[in-house]
Amino acid sequence: MIEKLMSLDRRYVFALVGLAVIIPTLLMIRFPIYVSQPTQNIYDFIEGLSEGEVVMIAFDYGPSSLAELNPMAIAVLRHCFRKRLRVIGMTLWPVGATLGDTLMREVAHEFDTTEGEDYVYLGYRPGVTNVLLQMGEDISAVFAEDYSGTPISEHPMMADVKNYNDIALVVDLAAGASVEGAWIPYTYTGYKQKIAAGVTGVIVSQLYPYLQTGQLVGLMPGLLGAAEYEKLIEQPGKGTAGMSAQSIVHLLVIVLVIVGNVAYFTTRRREQNAEVY
Amino acid sequence: MRRQVPLVLCFLFGITMTIQYYVPSRFSEDLKSEVLNWGLIIGPFALVLAIATLVRLHYTRIQRRSENWPYSIVVFVGLIVMAVVGTVQGFTSQGISGGPFEWIFNNIQVPMDATMFALLAFFIASAAYRAFRARTLEATLLLVAALLVMFGNAPIGDLIWQKISPVRPNLPSEVRQWILDNPNLSSRRAIIMGISLGAISQSLRIILGIERSYLGGGE
């Protein structure tokens, strides 16, 4: 039995993971969600803003991470539009340009919003450092036109938005090193711009030092962060739905690790005993 | 000349922009803005260089019939189609928002990229089963911390705990948060300090012309 476990064909593991994703998703199981303080901080900050204030959302991710970060983006956008905040979208990733554009339009259509008055999507410009630093001086020097090709001077909402001084919060939704490698060193350090982050699960732990120092207002951890934010805005979405599959798969991995270790140590003890005799 | 000119430019701009950061004057701000504008103009040339390198690499693969060379044809097809569609659409309509460019991206690249990444879950589960062993004290600490964070990261962790104990209903979530806030934060900060000191010393070496590997090996 133990030997069988040690040499278990990985296709059985794949099949278990597949079932652990498919079954809870189909059954639409819901679990209670505990909101962590870093996510609560982002919500509280946005909730404390006044109507008309500006939030910039950076879609710094590609299609590979959209399952985790799109639900976050949707939840934050819904919160901003519901509070009648003005939203500027942009990205430091070329592949994020189309994703951000599609998403902003989709969410904006849920609300009584007008492009150019309530939101603008700027798209992508190459040169991460120079883009961030120059936006601190003059956004129109970097993005003369928005993603649709309309000069940003023609958008009424940009009339009183020149640089970071006119932006209340930047929310960086990131799948890479853009938070600690770009936004914090250049935008926070250089211009004292308030920054919040929503990141994929694998990089969450790296960002905790910036939370403690106050360089980050708050932090949303992966799909769980999206589910937490959806709970805060009282509008469940794909983050909440994904928690069922995530919960079962996490449990499965925990069980697999424990079983793997039990099998390993049992086999090792038998081998040691065999050597003694 | 090919080495001296970049070294002199690097030294001049490095020193100037370092001093500029500490000089709060109108001239200093204008200088910064001007240099940043130059940077924005020069930046896109890196994309041209990247495309040229990509084309050369895959052209060579096809020419030499290297292993998996047909995939290089797919690279060229993707590159040409997206560049042509994007450029034509950019000239004929309002930017690249919507239209065929967005359709190709949303219906080809997005599902393929997301599928590739989703496969990771299967390999991570299999690797965790086979390789995550408590062989040493360090490995045991890592394993226990990982299991506790995973348990707290899934809402089912709190639910199971509530069935076991009526005390502190969100204990798994709180334990996860404690691990992230304390041992994780302190060790990560030490790493960041080390990286930062290394980055400062490396920057000084580049500005002063001691570190020259960025110039490449050619004379």
Image (cartoon, rainbow, N blue to C red):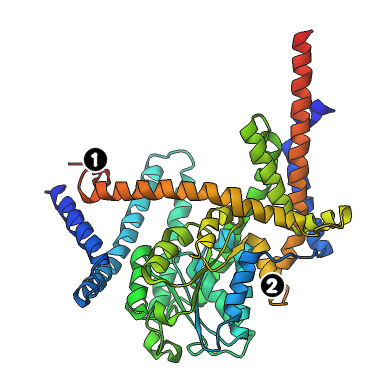
In what quadrant of the picture does the C terminus of chain A appear? top right
Image coordinates of residue A146 in percent, x first then y, are: 42, 80
- The image shows residue B114, relative to residue B125, as above or below, that is below
| Residue A212, quarter of picture | bottom right
Q: Residues within 10 Å of mark 2 (few under 14, many from 20)?
A: many
Q: Is residue A33 visible?
A: yes
Q: Residues within 10 Å of mark 1 (few under 14, many from 20)?
A: few
Identify residue type, mark 2. Glu
> Mark 2 near mark 1, Cβ–Cβ under 8 Å?
no
Left or right for A188, reference B115: left
Residue at the disc numbered 2:
A230
**Chain under label 2?**
A
Residue at x-position 43% and y-position 58%? A181
C-alpha distance separating marks 2 and 1: 53 Å
Marks 2, 1 in one chain: no
Image coordinates of residue B54 in percent, x first then y, are: 37, 52
Q: Residue furthest left?
A: B1
Q: Residue furthest top?
A: A277
Image coordinates of residue B109 in percent, x first then y, are: 55, 62
In what quadrant of the picture does the N terminus of chain A appear? top right
Image coordinates of residue B97 in percent, x first then y, are: 48, 77
